[in-house]
Image (tube, rainbow, N blue to C red):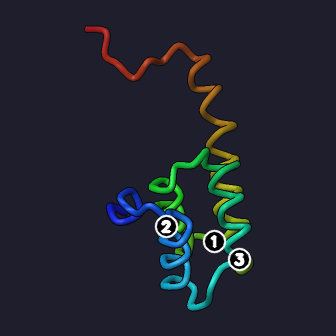
Amino acid sequence: MKRIDENGNKISALGDLYKALIGKNPNFGRLGQILRVSFKGDAGYMAKCLWQAPANRPAGDLLSYVQAMATKERKVAPKERKSGYTGMDND
């Protein structure tokens, strides 16, 4: 993960991770689009999702699964903010 944050070409580093996990090259255009749109450019978080996904996903496209993970995360976050929980103890 550290290499991805330090690397100037995040898409290439994510592609290397994808290839290590799946054994074939990803569609780099789609990888970049998912990074930009679904992960808002957070390559470290996307790398974490890519790393964790193969153990949990059903058979199918890894990038679609990771994209859905990011979309689900965005939908859950606003509900947590509305609940009034700030993540801090008010002791």
Q: Which mark is residue 57?
A: 1
Q: Nearer the viewer, mark 3 or mark 2?
A: 3
Q: Amino acid at mark 2?
A: Gln
Mark 3 surroundings within 10 Å by alpha-carbon count, few (fewer than 14), some (14 through 19), many (20 or more) = few
Q: Secondary structure at mark 3?
A: loop
Q: Secondary structure at mark 2?
A: helix
Q: Which residue is mark 2?
A: 52
Alpha carbons under labels 2 and 1: distance apart: 9 Å
Q: Residue 11 occupies which quadrant of the picture?
A: bottom right
Q: Secondary structure at mark 1?
A: loop
Q: Nearer the viewer, mark 1 or mark 3?
A: 3
x then y, percent, for residue 89: 31, 16
Q: Amino acid at mark 1?
A: Arg
x then y, percent, for residue 84: 53, 13
Along the line of sight, which residue is nearer the eye, 60 or 8?
Answer: 8
The vertical placement of 66 against 38, above or below, is below
Q: Which residue is mark 3?
A: 27
